[in-house]
Image (cartoon, rainbow, N blue to C red):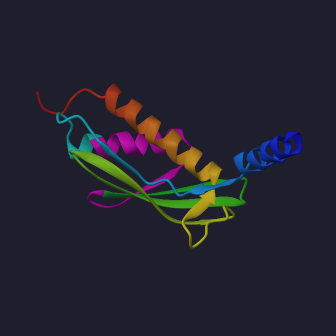
Amino acid sequence: MKKGCYLLCILLTVLGCSTSQTILNVENKVSPQKTSEEVKTAILIAGVQKGWTMTSAEPGRIDGKISVRNRHRAHIEIRYDASGYRIHYLDSQGLDADAAGTIHRNYNKWITLLDQAIQVELMRQPTGHQ
């Protein structure tokens, strides 16, 4: 019994240390008082603050790229309008992404931090129409 508990603890520790997680895609609604331009501005500011290179690809779409230590790269697409935004994974290098939809956990951390920064920027802005 004692040996079984010991093995279970080791197994749980190893599984908990895994660096792979399911790729995180984010979809968020925004305050109904925001304009599409305000959402775009919040995304661009937040991206730059978090180290992303943000490019307006077309109306309603921003491409984001990040490079960490010139070894780990991620490319995302952010679709937005006045009602919300969606962050979607496009591709990466050095992050062990696979066909099963898993990636190194740092990617999900970067996306979570970007999402939080966008939310902060949206709260910081005055509303578009009163």
Q: Image quadrant for the N terminus?
A: top right
Which residue appears farthest toward the left when viewing the image?
130
Image quarter of residue 21: bottom right
Residue 64 percent coordinates (x, y): 47, 56
Question: As drawn, is 87 to the left or to the right of 65?
Answer: left
Position above or below: 94 against 127: below
Q: Which part of the image, by quadrant, shows the C terminus?
A: top left
Residue 127 location (% of width, % of height): 21, 29
Note whether 108 is above or below 103 in the view shown: above
Is 98 drawn above or below residue 34 in the view shown? below
Where's residue 41, x and y in %? Answer: 33, 42
User: Which of the 4 image quarters holds residue 61?
Assistant: bottom left
Q: Can residue 46 be found in the magenta stretch? A: yes
For residue 97, above or below residue 47: below
Determine the residue located farthest toward the right in the rendered image.
Answer: 3
- Relative depth, front residue between 1 and 124: 1
Give the residue at x 35% y 53%.
Answer: 86
In the depicted view, which residue is nearer to us: 113 or 22?
22
**Residue at (21, 37) in percent of width and height:** 34
Q: Nearer the viewer, residue 86 or 38?
A: 86
On screen, residue 31 versus residue 75, left or right, reads left
Identify which residue is drawn at 54% across, 41% down.
50
Using the rendered view, name the quadrant where residue 129 is placed. top left
Q: Is residue 73 found inside the magenta-colored segment of the image? A: no
- Counting the numbered discs, the total is 0
Left or right? Give the position of 72 relative to 53: right
Q: Which residues are magenta?
A: 39-60
Q: Most extreme residue toward the bottom, as rendered?
A: 99
Query: Residue 4: x percent and y percent?
Result: 83, 46
